[in-house]
């Protein structure tokens, strides 16, 4: 499913950590209304790719465009205002603040009039957060903190939501809940770029997927094509 106007287009990026060539000529795109999954083993370069898109790391070459504009040299906070939200690996909530204060922080680029409707929308997707809205975020469970990190990102009304390992460290029942929420967000019109080691879950929700190995994209296809691909099954699905 190719789109003439991709929300995100990444072309030939190369990223180095010192002498280590971490991302090697990576290209992919995300169309409006898609869930695109980047899957691969730990250290394949998935998180590095997201950090490069969101301006936390810089590519030596290539191009990154978002909503038709070049963002190769944009500052991370400017990208949030443009509609790019990144939920990093490890959740990183403001531990001393309440749930609702965390969510309000997510709306810092939006007009004040949008905060209350934004909270309403997040609480509809995450009823648990509504129950816990006065609770200090550092006292939440891991699953609740993941929900909070996702909810906070949604408060910026993103054109693209980038999720980095949302299932990491969670019990299986919570992983199912998180992916159910990913499906709901997608059904409500959110475009999502998903980095996930749990390939089965990621490809089950993905419109399309890209397999990364040692910093390169080695395979691409629809979610269902990759789920049934023999090489992907052997490497990532235990089949």
Image (spheres, rainbow, N blue to C red):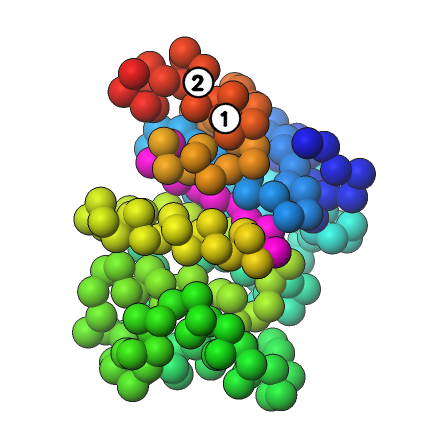
Q: Which residues are magenta?
A: 189-199
User: To which residue does mark 2 refer?
Assistant: 228
If the image is split into quadrants, where does the N terminus sit? top right
Q: CA distance from mark 2 to mark 1?
A: 6 Å
If the image is split into quadrants, where does the C terminus sit? top left
Q: Secondary structure at mark 2?
A: loop
Q: Residue visible at 50% across and 26% down? A: 224
Question: Are discs 2 and 1 less than 8 Å apart at CB?
Answer: yes
> Vertical placement of 163 versus 117: above or below?
above
Dividing the picture into quadrants, the one containing residue 108 is: bottom right
Q: Residue visible at 43% across and 23% down? A: 227
Q: How many badges with numbers are in the image?
A: 2
Q: Does the image show residue 215?
A: no
User: To which residue does mark 1 refer?
Assistant: 224
Residue lying at the far top of the rendered structure: 230
From the top left corner, tell me how far across and down residue 237 is, in percent.
32, 23
Q: Residue visible at 60% across and 76% down? A: 109
In the foreground, 160 or 227: 227
Q: Residue visible at 60% across and 63% down? A: 158
Q: Does the image show residue 165?
A: yes
Dividing the picture into quadrants, the one containing residue 214 is: top left
From the top left corner, tell me how far across and down residue 92 is, in percent.
34, 64
From the top left corner, tell me how far across and down residue 118 is, in percent.
54, 77
From the top left corner, tell me how far across and down residue 74 is, in percent.
66, 58
Q: Secondary structure at mark 1?
A: helix
């Amino acid at each position: 499913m190719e789109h003439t106007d991709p929300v995100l287009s990444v072309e030939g990026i190369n990223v180095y950590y010192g002498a280590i060539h971490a991302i090697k000529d990576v290209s992919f795109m995300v169309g409006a209304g898609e869930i695109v999954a980047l899957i691969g083993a730990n250290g394949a370069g998935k998180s590095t790719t997201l950090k490069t898109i969101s301006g936390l790391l810089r590519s030596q070459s290539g191009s990154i465009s978002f909503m038709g504009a070049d963002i190769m040299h944009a500052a991370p906070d400017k990208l949030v205002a443009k509609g790019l939200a990144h939920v990093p690996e490890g959740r990183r909530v403001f531990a001393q603040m309440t749930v609702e204060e965390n969510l309000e922080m997510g709306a810092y680029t939006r007009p004040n009039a949008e905060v209350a409707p934004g909270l309403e929308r997040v609480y509809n997707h995450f009823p648990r957060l509504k129950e816990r809205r006065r609770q200090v975020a550092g006292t939440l469970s891991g699953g609740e903190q993941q929900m909070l990190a996702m909810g906070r990102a949604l408060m910026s009304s993103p054109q693209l939501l980038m999720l980095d390992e949302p299932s990491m460290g969670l019990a299986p029942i919570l992983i199912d809940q998180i992916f159910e929420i990913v499906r709901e967000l997608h059904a409500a019109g959110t475009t999502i770029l998903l980095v996930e080691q749990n390939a089965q879950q990621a490809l089950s929700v993905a419109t399309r997927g890209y397999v990364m190995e040692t910093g390169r994209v080695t395979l691409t296809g629809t979610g269902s094509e990759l789920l049934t691909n023999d090489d992907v099954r052997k490497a990532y699905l235990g089949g």
